[in-house]
Amino acid sequence: MNMRWSLDALYPSFESDDFNSDLEKSFDMINKIKTWSENNLEDSNNAAKKMEEYLKLEMECLNLYSKVSAFARLTSSVDAKNEKALKILDKLQSKATELTKPEVTFQKWLNTLDNLDDIISSSDFLKNHKFYIKENASKAKYLLSDEEEILISKMSNTGSKAWANLQNVVSSTLMVDITVDDEEKKLPLPVVRNMAYNKDPNVRKNAYEAELKAYKKIEESSAAALNGIKGEVLTICEMRGYESPLEETLIKSRMDKETLDAMLTAMKESLPTFHRYYHRKAELLGYENGLPFYEMFAPIGEVDIEFSYEEAKNYIVKNFRSFSDELANFAKNAFEERWIDAEPREGKRGGAFCSNLHSIKESRILANFNGSFSNMTTLAHELGHGYHGHCLNDETVLNSSYTMPVAETASIFCETIVENAALKDANDKEALSILESSIQGYGQVIVDIYSRFLFESKLFEERKDHALSVNELKEIMTNSQKESYGHGLDHNYLHPYMWTNKPHYYYAGLNFYNFPYAFGLLFAKGVYAEYLKRGDLFVKEYDKLLRATGQNDIYDVCKMMNIDVHSVDFWRSSLNLIKEDIEKFIDLSKSI
């Protein structure tokens, strides 16, 4: 089965007539929006008509631009040295800065309309986009002058975006020197990181040591990139009047501080339970002083649960069908139509992601599949993201954009489906292995995410004063890991370079892309509990929930499922489900 994706549904190549025609059209659309906004947004006459015309122009432009940029971005994600893709991306990013002025002009114009609600209610088209319009009007509070906004947009191409591109290239092309079977090799970083799941402890430790050593080759460039990006973020946040990058992230996430504080309170309370898990895993592997970082993903038990790519596909589709045919058919189609690139190789970025391509009503999923149970659940996770996009296919592009926290809801829900299915059919030895794999993932989303939140908070605090050295960044990271993991980990074997490994730190527009994962896990747990109570009646409500994520604040989305995210008790109840799994794991590990 082919493990590389096909992008032909976008374009056959950069040289194709379709690609170059759409590229030119997207540039023409940007020029058209610029001219239209200059000529039509000077007064409130015919406001409803003007609003409709602007939004329709914006939708047409977004559909074209997102299609050509996705082709370049997806191409570069599996081929970091593809000069054509990188050149096109740079060209697109530069041209996109010209949208800043019409966007700012439109937002400021909306804010001048005293009767905005009346104008919106006068048109079915505008009513359908009420949330998008109102959200844009509220953004005017944080806008600078037109000249400043344009300058910031242009300078980011040679600032934060250039730093991010540098980090992407150096990390994607980093080759790790490692000894494998007494042979010296140079392997891509994702291949070496996947060795953390190997059943041989010597392989795991060897890979960890080689990985950390390899980061020394890029530590200075990565630190420079991180300092440049976070420095820019702080400067612009202050200029716009945000209290902090965290406040900006919360506003952009459509999430309030009360929700975040309630969730973090419950997460912090749960850490001792996770520490018990790490201690027990350490004992099972023969360690006395907590778990070394390189054993975090070590398989537990005599049962090796492995999948070929074909087996992973069949397992996922089969268990998705237990929830709904639509979900199963979506996943089956994604595999068969080659929407997934699962093969680890040089030049391909690590990790996994899903890109929902609204313009062609498809998705593309990147993974680095090595056959482990965890890799199988990662595929299910990313297919959940794709299904979320699938549920929004009939919405306009303006109503299909959802924020980071709810972005993880469908993915973790799908992950839960396959994990629970595996547990249901397992004997005690298999259950031990499956539970451990699941808890391992929960630990990443709760404990490690908490350490990343602590790291980024401290990073921003220190960056206000000075650019941080490599040693300072390493120290902040290890201190954050110590606080979050406690003595569950052996403090002599932490991961001081996690700030180099995680790409999210290098996206100026995605600060604090850590707590949304915890939100997604815990909210999805609550939603899954509703599914268990209500069965088939829940399926339509679930799809409705996913469709609503593009047009509601998080609090209102959650309220659709009768969930109060301001309540610490809700977050505790979801974490208690994980605690039950940890207790089962500990009990099973003592009885087998």
Image: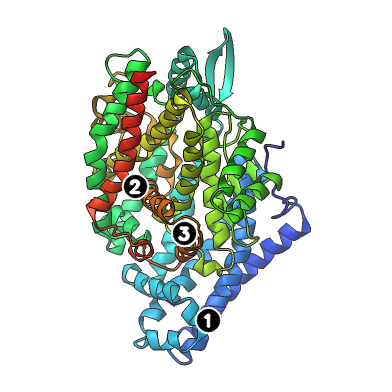
Quadrant in the rendering for residue 366: top right
**From the image, which quarter does the N terminus lie in?**
top right
Q: Earlier in the sequence, mark 1 or mark 3?
A: 1
Identify residue for label 2.
Answer: 515
In this image, 473 relative to 85: left or right?
left
> For the point 53% across and 33% down, which residue is it?
375
Question: SS of the residue at dot 3?
Answer: helix
Residue 197 visible to the viewer: yes
Foreground: 83 or 394?
394
Task: Give the CA separation, mark 1 to mark 2.
Answer: 35 Å
Q: Give the crowd class for mark 3: few <14, some 14-19, many >=20 residues within 10 Å.
A: some
Relative vertical location of residue 120 with respect to residue 541 in this rendering, above or below: below
| Amino acid at pointer 1 | Phe
| Amino acid at pointer 2 | Phe
In this image, 84 relative to 278: left or right?
right
| Amino acid at pointer 3 | Phe
Q: Single out the mark in the foreground, 1 or 3.
A: 3
Identify residue for label 3.
Answer: 538
Foreground: 93 or 568?
568
Relative vertical location of residue 245 with respect to residue 306 in this rendering, above or below: below
Q: Earlier in the sequence, mark 2 or mark 3?
A: 2
**From the image, which quarter does the C terminus lie in?**
top left
Identify residue for label 1.
Answer: 125
Question: SS of the residue at dot 2?
Answer: helix
In this image, 467 relative to 408: left or right?
left
Task: Give the CA separation, mark 1 to mark 3.
Answer: 30 Å
Foreground: 228 or 266?
266
Residue 510 visible to the viewer: no
Foreground: 481 or 456?
481
> For the point 36% across and 79% down, which residue is it?
111
